[in-house]
Image (cartoon, rainbow, N blue to C red):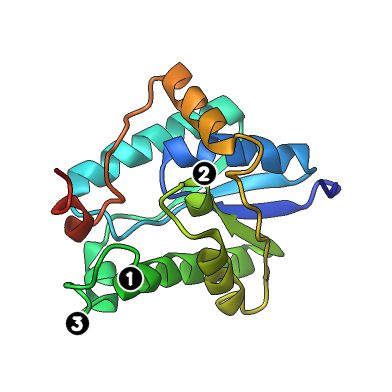
């Protein structure tokens, strides 16, 4: 594990559950994580608030700064227009990830933070290589840090922390298209 000396890194957080361990891991690497909650893919404002509240709990526990955007589902629906019938993990998901990581890169740049990453890669349902390639593609003026947070039992560690903190646990990525596939 490379050690950085107190450099800030913006971590796009998809939810409190997924960000818990990555925040700790980045701290161990020597970064000062700044959490960025930008998720217009979430289908309802009520769900958005639940996930944001869980993210606030994690950030308070981890003693890190949280930056979040107001709920705006239209940004997501405009980005994925024409891809509504794509299968899970298909082109719609790629566009969704690109939208969120592009905003994270822009936010990092506007804040003068040189590095950014995402907690999305901790999920066993997400493709680390694909997400990293998207992060690198959109990293205009900042550096995407491709850390695979699943390694070293990261998914187990983040789930244990979420249980310890009593976080809201969702069972879908957030968009209405994924929700319709839940049995």
Residue corresponding to mark 2: 66
Q: Can residue 55 be seen by looking at this rendering?
A: yes
Secondary structure at numbered mark 3? loop
The x and y percentages for residue 30 are 80, 43
The answer to whether 33 appears left or right of 59 in the picture is: right
Residue 150 versus residue 177 in the image, above or below: above
The x and y percentages for residue 85 are 16, 72
Secondary structure at numbered mark 2? strand
Give the CA distance from mark 2 to mark 3: 33 Å
Q: 71 or 14, which lies in front?
A: 14
Give the CA distance from mark 1 to mark 3: 13 Å
The quadrant where residue 166 appears: top left
Q: 130 or 136, which lies in front?
A: 130
For the residues carrying marks 1 and 2, which lies nearer the camera in this image? 1
The answer to whether 88 appears left or right of 106 in the picture is: left
Q: How many marks?
A: 3
For the residues carrying marks 1 and 3, which lies nearer the camera in this image? 1
Residue 98 versus residue 7 in the image, above or below: below
Label 1 Cα neighbours within 10 Å, binned few <14 / some 14-19 / many ≥20: few
Give the CA distance from mark 1 to mark 2: 30 Å
The quadrant where residue 41 appears: bottom left
Instruction: Identify the image quadrant of the C terminus.
Output: top left
Secondary structure at numbered mark 1? loop
- Mark 2 or mark 1, which is nearer the start of the sequence? 2
Residue corresponding to mark 3: 82
Residue displayed at 41% across by 51% down: 125
For the residues carrying marks 2 and 3, which lies nearer the camera in this image? 3
Q: Which mark is residue 90?
A: 1
Label 2 Cα neighbours within 10 Å, binned few <14 / some 14-19 / many ≥20: some
Q: Can residue 113 be seen by looking at this rendering?
A: no
The x and y percentages for residue 101 are 49, 66
């Amino acid at each position: 594990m490379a050690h950085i000396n107190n450099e800030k890194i913006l971590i796009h957080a998809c939810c409190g559950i997924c960000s818990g361990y990555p925040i700790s891991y980045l701290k161990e690497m020597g970064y000062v994580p700044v959490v960025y909650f930008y998720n217009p893919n979430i289908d309802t404002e009520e769900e958005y608030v639940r996930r944001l509240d869980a993210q606030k709990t994690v950030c308070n526990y981890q003693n890190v700064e949280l930056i979040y955007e107001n709920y705006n589902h239209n940004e997501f629906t405009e980005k994925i227009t024409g891809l509504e019938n794509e299968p899970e993990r298909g082109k719609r998901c790629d566009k969704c990830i690109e939208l969120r990581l592009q905003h994270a890169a822009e936010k990092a740049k506007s804040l003068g933070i040189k590095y950014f990453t995402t907690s999305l890669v901790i999920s066993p349902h997400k493709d680390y290589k694909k997400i990293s390639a998207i992060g690198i593609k959109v990293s205009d003026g900042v550096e995407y840090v491709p850390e695979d947070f699943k390694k070293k039992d990261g998914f187990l560690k983040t789930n244990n922390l979420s249980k310890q903190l009593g976080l809201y646990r969702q069972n879908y990525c957030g968009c209405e298209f994924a929700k319709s596939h839940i049995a």
